[in-house]
Image (spheres, rainbow, N blue to C red):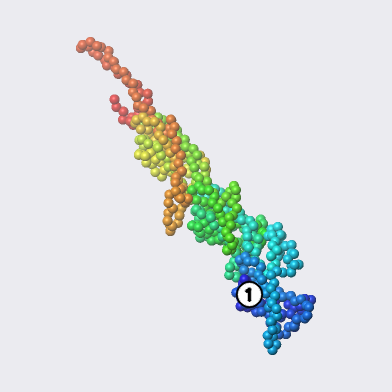
Amino acid sequence: MDRWSGRQLGLLDVGATGAAGPGIGFGTTGAWSGPGAGTLTLTDSDTHFEKDRYYNLSFHVTNPSAHQEGQQISYEFAMSSTGSTNLDSMTVTGVLTAIDARAEPLIAGRSQANVGYENSDTHPLFIRKPTLLVANISQQTSNPCADNTLRVLLRSNVPLLTTSFPGCMPLVSLSGLQTSGTFADFVDIVNIKADGVSSADVVGTKGKWTQSLGVLVLNFTDTFQAGVTFSMDFVIINPAKGQASQPVSITLWDEDTVAMNRHPINPPLFVEAAEILLVHANQTSDVPCEDSQITVTVSLNVVLFARCSPTLTITGLRHSRSAGVSVTEASNIFGLTSWDQVSGSITLNTTVDVPAAQYAFTVTLRNPNFGQSSQLLSVEGHIFNLVPSSLTAPAAGTPLRPVPFTLSVQSQDAPLRVAQLALTSFIGQSNPYPCGDNEITGNTHAPTALYYACCVFV
């Protein structure tokens, strides 16, 4: 019922109403049985009680952390001289009407509007059910792989006291923050404010974080006042895969877990899916065996953060005669990783963050020695969260290792469209007579250039 046991309690306001002093009232100490029995025994051989007088008795106990209704309090009186005589017992379930009529709860400086008032507030050992009147959560960014600042707003109907008694350290835990890319055991709790004013000493600067469960436990270091709106921030890494915001719950002590109010525009751990918005290609030549400068333009919808190892793979540049290539791009963000002549694939990577923007990649390829229509061009992007080596690598398609995002395009003009080689030939002679000198003349027309690189022979 309370947190005291096995000790003497000091009594306050000892003595009869309007008079106090030695030999009047209950004495100055009483024997306390502890929370199991909840009994206070008062004995003082030197005291006496006058007829028709009212006596006050006040003493302190520490309330439990769990909600409970007001307790029935029983008074039992016994007198002994040569023997023992028990007086009629009396049970008290409430308090004086004058106390019940208080307009405010017993929380200094907090208005009724902030923390409310219950008629039972002054009933003996009635413990309010700890309830969060405000429990909001929002986020700063929906970009995959980003450092995402989540903001929590909390307001309680009771003070959350930090005491040394077991079970009385405030325990507030948030759950439902699954799929993040943060694997540390603790996250920093920053920007702590009470009604907009800095209050860094209320909540510890480290919160216990469990990535696999998506649970954050807050460590309170000072009283979390009732009726005050506290705000605090913490940062976790968004997953690489786009996802909808999931419900987030909060638990106050061992009371019921309740759903937090997610911000309607910036809900927690909503992550936008990475996409390629545009792919376009052009080329400078369609002549067989001629070097053609091919430019592939790619537009990205989100920042690709370096921590998620972004790569772009361009496929469909088939049948070129180039064994080796180089790729240029104006911002120099991407670098060439590999070129596969057979499949016509270029793989690019980067070690820096890639802004959401449009990028033009230029590569020079030698056209094949035969005509062909333009090739189907695909651009594939890939990002994934890094996982500690001590953990099992996530499977493909999971939030931390999503499948690649791809966009394909095929146009009439590019890439690697090569004109068909179709010669038009005429041949004639100058003399049809026997034994005459005859000049044979042939005429050939090529609609496209014939380059030595094609090893032309007639």
The quarter of the rendered structure image containing the N terminus is bottom right
- Residue 315, by quadrant, is top left
Left-right relation of 53 to 289: right
Q: In what quadrant of the picture does the C terminus appear? A: top left
Q: Position of residue 195 (x, y in %)?
A: 67, 57
Residue at image position (50%, 44%) is 274
Is residue 383 something one can see in this rendering?
A: yes
Residue at 48 percent across and 41 percent down: it is 276
Image-based side of 414 in relation to 258, left or right? left
127 vs 291: above or below: below
Instruction: Classify residue 323 as left or right of residue 249.
Output: left
In the rendered image, the residue lying farthest to the top is: 433
Closer-to-camera residue (287/435): 287
Residue 151 visible to the viewer: no
Q: Nearer the viewer, residue 438 or 266?
A: 266
Q: Residue furthest front?
A: 88
Residue at screen point 44% across, 48% down: 397
For mark 1, what is the residue?
A: 38
Q: Quadrant of residue 433?
A: top left
Question: Is residue 186 placed above or below 164 in the rendered structure?
Answer: above
Return the residue nearer the eye: 377 or 402: 402
Outermost residue toward the left in this view? 435
Please state if 126 lies on the left or on the right of 388 as rendered.
right
- The kind of residue tagged 1 is Gly
What residue sits 59% from the left and 62% below the top?
A: 255
As drawn, 99 above or below 11? above
Q: Position of residue 299 (x, y in %)?
A: 50, 39
Residue 150: x %, y % from top left: 57, 53
SS for callout 1: loop
Task: Return the x and y of residue 280 as percentages of the image width and height.
Answer: 47, 35
